[in-house]
Image (tube, helix red, strand yellow):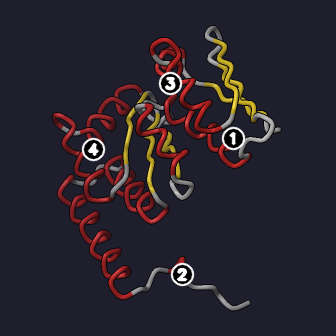
Amino acid sequence: MVTQYVRIPQDRIGVLIGHNGIVKEDIEKKSGTRIDVDSDEGEVCIEGLEGGDPLKALRVADVVRAIGRGFSPENAFALLDDELLLFDVISIAHLTAKTLKRVKGRVIGRNGRTRRVIEDISGVKMSVYGKTIGIIGYSHQIRPASDAIEMLINGAPHSAVYSFLERKRREEEEKEIYGLRMDDYELPL
């Protein structure tokens, strides 16, 4: 049996549990785990049940972290459904309060436009929450999205970031067309 502990912010506990416990119950059913939530401390204990899939039990920690980092349960559940999806977090805790607000505004954009453009072009899901930016996607999607976010954090113009993402998407499409995916090749030892 696998037992893991994850801490999430107090204001995300209600989202993790869901109305009448429905979200927590869904996670438990889909993963073969038991989840105990300490509402006072924000600590979540995830325990794999006998006969359950140990890999899914391990993936539950990412689902809980994703919900804790601002993702909707629906977006976080994708991590359980597809084992190739990854969850990544970019910390912006090193920024001062004034800079943090400005950077979050740059990443989100007016009416959420920048976030939507990054999501649409790279194919990821993003969440800007607290002092972090969470990303859910495949490895080949997360890298350009993370680079784009870093460009925004460092002050690059939005137009340059969009151009960068478009170029990366074209390169990825060419790899798929010509079958040049690096994941398909084994390197000789």
* Closer-to-camera residue (158/6): 6
Amino acid type of the residue that numbered disc 3 sits on in the rendered structure:
Val
* Residue at (31% x, 82% y) in the render: 174
Mark 4 vs 2, N-terminal side = 4
158 displayed left or right of 146: left
Q: Which residue is mark 2?
A: 184
Q: Is residue 28 left or right of residue 78?
A: right
Q: Is disc 3 placed on a helix, strand or loop?
A: helix
User: How far is the residue under mark 3 from the one under mark 1?
Assistant: 16 Å
The kind of residue tagged 1 is: Ala
Nearer the camera: disc 3 or disc 4: 3
Quarter of the figure with the N terminus: top right
| Residue placed furthest toward the bottom | 188
Height in image: 151 above or below 73? Answer: below
Quarter of the picture containing the C terminus is: bottom right
Could you tell me how far apart the alpha carbons at marks 3 and 2 are, in whole angstroms? 37 Å
Kindly identify which numbered label has been placed on residue 23: 3
Depth check: give the residue in front, 5 or 159: 5
**Dot 4, crowdedness within 10 Å: few (<14), some or many (≥20)?**
many
Q: CA distance from mark 1 to mark 4?
A: 30 Å
Q: Mark 4 highlights which residue?
A: 115
Q: Mark 3 and mark 2 in contact? Answer it, CB < 8 Å.
A: no
What's the residue type where badge 4 is placed? Arg
- Mark positioned earlier in the residue sequence (3 or 2): 3
Callout 3–callout 4 Cβ contact below 8 Å: no
Mark positioned earlier in the residue sequence (3 or 1) = 3
In the rendered image, which residue does mark 1 sit on?
57
The label nearer to you, 4 versus 2, is: 2
In terms of image quadrants, where is residue 73?
A: top left
